[in-house]
Amino acid sequence: MYSDDDDGDVPPYCKGETAAGPGSKDIFVQLVISLGLGVTAFIAFCILRPRWKSLYAARRRHSDPQIALPTLPDSFFGWIPALYRVTEEQVLASAGLDAFVFLSFFKMSLRLFATMFFFAVAVLWPIHNTFDAGTSTPPGDTSGNATSYTPLMQSHDLHLPTSVDNILIAPDPEDKSWTYLWSYLAFTWFFSVLAIYFMNSETIKVIKIRQDYLGTQSTITDRTFRLTGIPRDLRSEEKIKEFVENLEIGHVRSVTLCRNWAEIDALVAQRQVVLRKLEEAWSVYLAQQPAVGLPSGGQAREAEDDTAQEDAINNESGENRRLLADDSLRSLIRERPRPKVRLRFGLFRLRNRRIDALDYYEEKLRRLDEKIRAARRKEYPPTDTAFVTMDSIAACQMAVQATVDPRPGQLLTKPAPAPSDVIWKNTYAPRYKRQMQSWAITIFITFLSVLWFFPVAALAQLLSICSIRKIAPSLADSLSEHDITKAFIQTGLPTLVVSLLNVLVPYLYDYLSNIQGMVSQGDVELSAISKNFFFIFFNIFVVYAVSGSAALADFWAIIGNSLRDTRTIASKVAGSIQDLNNFYLNFIMLQGLGLFPFKLLQFGSISLYAIYRMGAKTPRDFAELVQPSLFNYGFYLPTALLVFILCLVYSILPGAHIVLLLGLCYFSLGYFVYKYQLLYSMDQPQHATGGAWPIICGRIIVGLIAFQGIMIAILVLQTAFEAASLIVPLVVLTFWYHFYSRRRFTPLTKFIALRSIKRASDPGSESRPDQDPNQVQPQTRLARRLSTIDEDKEKGMRFINPSLVMPLEQPWVYQDPPPLIPESPFDSNTGSINGNSDSQVAVPTIHNGPGSVSSSFSLGDTHVWRDNGEENV
């Protein structure tokens, strides 16, 4: 903040303001940029969609025609209404419960913000226009500047320091609750209650669908629970089976006691590396063309003598013609060179020798196969974790919802993840090791959040041309003379960098979640959602709200003053939130109008395809190129939650109708884009049974608390103390609802209610006991006649470490994948798998690589590598 003594050195565009933030012209520039990016990407998608069906329709197949997704027409815009007509039942049947919950959040947001948009246009907009509420400076407190009252979209003329200083300096400032400020109080209550109502209604709907979906299917996951903290005297399959059956909750079908399989898992991982190297060596060898050359004179005469001698022998034996035309060409064809590998040995591996790569890797693979077969016959020490499969879903649910043992930390029951979702290396890791990993990652993320502050806070300086002037005065003067360039620097560049952070940082947090020691990929996905939201909310909302466009060095002064007087932080947040209105407006605009079409286009996958295509050598590499892209909820949900919170925070302030309109555009486009990707083009292997919904509700509560706290700060900043004090009970009510809903709804989002489980004697009315059975019977019959996606995925599976039973893949050298050689029962039997023999359950064929031909999803006509010369692109 400039002092009065420096007024002579301050340019006109910085006088009387804290930050010259983005203005209306900047918003127009951002709108043009966003529309230009979005329209270009959307047109490209509409052109490429019917041509690249192996990319944009990779999931388009289902065995049951009654729940098969409709075929989208190849016309330019005809796919949009067809996609809109896809029902929730079809989403559940083809994409699963996680996709349904994800899309439900977007639909709820659309209904909520459409209602808020109506009141913002019909009530709040006239109020702001009538009272000219585009400034946070109360009437009578202006400093003689006639431009004090300007719309919030031109917030560079605000006189925030005047009102802040008045509040902090005056001992008892007069309560100037203007008439229109009571509308802030009324709509803060109204919009908060409205958000809680929509969230509560959607939670009840999600719980009903979840209970009906899980209660009417029958998978091994629904009948299995994870037993942890097993004492040493119970660590055998027979004892665990006897212990569970003595609880008299049902019969045990099978028990998988987790053992220390580190040795065999390491051998299998090492085998995969050697297999890849062998396939690459074969590809290099087969790609070389045999050399044809003219032999020397001596070699030619020798070849002629050999040919004549061979003809004489053929004549004597009555064979006057050869099966192969002109075998003499063999002598002219020199054998293609075989690839070599360099081996280092000796002291400090200083000596080396080049040997035949094919022979070396084949021999290494053969020895590893022998070691793996021997390791499968070993007995491994048991751990304190087991997967217990019951004979019914009801028995399993009684086990996971009950306290089994009176000793703390002993014999704890938890719902089991899907067999394909289990991270087996973490099942036999000691509990203390996994806890240390979890705490270490948490501490590292906390430290990382502090580090992220510096680039994010430095980025905030670009929002203010006056802040830029403190660092580079000549650049600021030049920007002030070029409006378009200034608009791009102040608006386009910060929002673009923030958007790039939203794209890149989730990969880091996803990696950290994977090494945190969790037992299932579903837990990893939910953890990634929480971590990424924390980064986005703290760095993009909190840091910006506190620092605003102030200098980075001033941030610590603000924090220090806030520790001495809490009114400082309240006034600073209120002022920064209003200053940053246009920045967040541009952020939502770029995310919705600009980047959603690029997500639909899968621009990243297309760009990486060219890079990976150049590096692909083996048929397995080419098969990986056409695999469906993976949809990670942790990459997309946190940004949507941040936009939800931003729409809440700005739903009452001047310009609220524009923010809510852009919010409607964001969630409308997001719903269609993500619906298309989840149903047609991308795969989601995780199995969290809708576990993201409690996280969504918790973050909405965080947004409501932030919204209410900011409204209190804004009213206090405008000396409307009575109105601000009446919002405090709303904050208490929001906290109460949070704890109330967690106690009421959380068990139903984690478990299956016993009344929801399908019964043979009733066609499904138990799953919806609060409704008329005649109304739900047709829907329940439809759900039972059709298998769910989870039942299709888990058909024939059981809980067993794949390293113990999966067939050892042979090198994939030619066009078609090699046939699988099943292991003999003797080789696959480790003596530590079955507690109750369940031989009728087949062990699934598991492939670690993409060479499996038993994929659940169609990849078009390019699901295997075909050697078509130059056409193989």
Image (cartoon, rainbow, N blue to C red):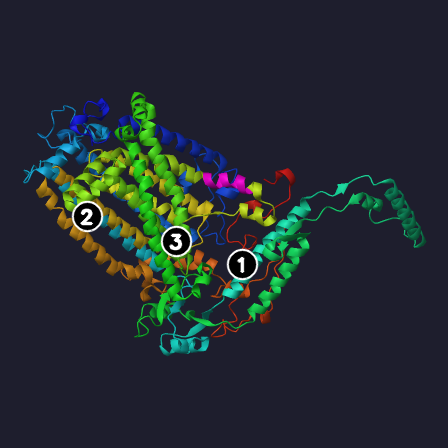
Whether the magenta-drawn stretch holds residue 105 is answered as no
Q: Nearer the viewer, residue 695 or 54?
A: 695
Q: Which residues are magenta?
A: 603-612
Q: CA distance from mark 2 to mark 3?
A: 31 Å
Q: Is residue 273 left or right of residue 633?
A: right
Q: Which mark is residue 368?
A: none
Identify the amino acid type marked 2. Answer: Val
Q: Residues within 10 Å of mark 3 (few under 14, many from 20)?
A: many
Quarter of the image holding residue 577? top left
Identify the amino acid type marked 1. Answer: Ala
x then y, percent, for residue 116 = 23, 40
Q: Which residue shows up at 40% across the image and 50% down it?
A: 510
The residue singled out by tag 3 in the image is: 525
x then y, percent, for residue 737 = 20, 54
Between discs 2 and 3, the one toward the N terminus: 2
Query: If the image is split into quadrants, where does the C terminus sit?
Result: top right
Point out the frontmost of discs 3 and 1: 1
Identify the amino acid type marked 3. Answer: Glu
**Residue 632 appears in view:** yes
- Secondary structure at numbered mark 2: helix
The residue singled out by tag 2 in the image is: 193
- Secondary structure at numbered mark 1: helix
Does the magenta stretch mainly form a helix, a strand or a loop?
A: helix
- Secondary structure at numbered mark 3: helix
Between discs 1 and 2, the one toward the N terminus: 2
Whether the magenta-drawn stretch holds residue 607 is answered as yes
The residue singled out by tag 1 in the image is: 269
x then y, percent, for residue 11 = 23, 23
x then y, percent, for residue 383 = 43, 70
